[in-house]
Image (cartoon, rainbow, N blue to C red):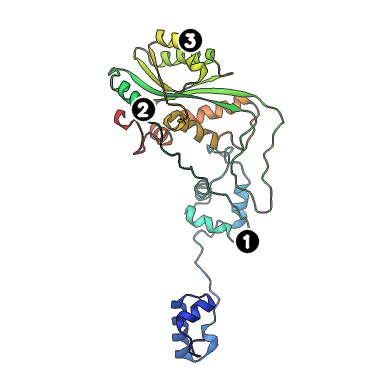
Amino acid sequence: MVARGRTVQEAAQITGAQPWSLYAWVRTYVHTHRPDSIRDASRSGRPRVARTITDARIAHELRRDPMRLGYKATSWTVSLLADHLQDKYGCAISPRTLRPADAGPGPAMETPPVCLRDQGPQPCPEKRGLVRRLKRMPARAVVLFSDATILRWFPPLRYVWAFRGEQAKVKITGQNAKRVLFGTIDPRTGHRVVLRRPRQRQGDFQAFLRELRRRYRGRPIWLLLDKASFHQAHRSQQLAAQLEVTLLWLPKQCPELNSQDHLWKELKRLIPANRQFLTTDEEATYAERWLLGLTSTDALHKAGVLSDDFWLKAFV
């Protein structure tokens, strides 16, 4: 087309090729005067970085259970799989290197991205009131975020890797049961307390208040928590006053303000998702080990306390 009078831009628009590619083809043809000189030649491609990590070995490891291998996760992620392959085969491989493996033949996996939607502007008056109260907190007092979560025997379903053409399956018994975990995190130190209970009622919350009093002897406790009915029950508030526990109510419909809630979300993503344990107590045990096994820095990071936008940054 260029030889017949078309401009490079016109030829690029017609063929869909980039203009700089057409310039290179023209230079090559002018130099050789052979049409086959601009034909694409076969290339070996980028040399394999990890020759010992084959598609068959990747497929074999993907079929294994990461939790049974000692990892604190119920399904593989790219980074976790890369670390596992590197440790097992002694060959350096990064997640970026591993990802292209699912583009060709062999084990091909797809997982859709998950992102948080914009929460929009949050109510400020109650937050400002909490901040004013916290400024009057005694120097020896400990401030804690508190929340409870329900672990059901029927597992929550989350995105999971599966081989292309195969349906991912979660085996269940058809039965259901639950356990409740009450937990707190100290935004200053990352110290966590967790208590397992059969239900989520005011008696269970009161047992948790007594556990907190036992853990923080001699120190006033300022507890940031939501306005659940068992929190606001008269007997719960009465016991809190007796135990020198000040209850501070977080604004309604604002779970993002509760750092303990962030920890529960991460826990449910990694531990009970897509797996039914033998018993609910086994599930609760795994959950407790995961939560208490985090380092203080990891716990604060997952709870959002180390974020530049953390709403109580002035107190930590």
Q: Which mark is residue 105?
A: 1
Q: Earlier in the sequence, mark 2 or mark 3?
A: 2
Q: 142 and 63: which one is in front?
A: 142
Type of amino acid at the residue the image marks with label 2: Pro
SS state under label 2: helix
Q: CA distance from mark 2 to mark 3?
A: 25 Å
Give coordinates of residue 126: x percent, y percent. 38, 26
Task: Kindly identify the amino acid type of the residue bearing the numbered disc 3.
Answer: His
Residue 93 visible in the snapshot: no
Q: Which mark is residue 234?
A: 3
- Residue type marked 1: Pro
Report the quarter where the C terminus lies: top left
Q: Name the residue at 58% across, 27% down.
A: 151
Secondary structure beneath label 1:
loop
Sequence-wise, which precedes: disc 1 or disc 2?
Answer: 1
- Residue at image mark 2: 125
Res. 68 image quadrant:
top right
Judge depth for marks 1 and 2 and give the one in front.
Answer: 2
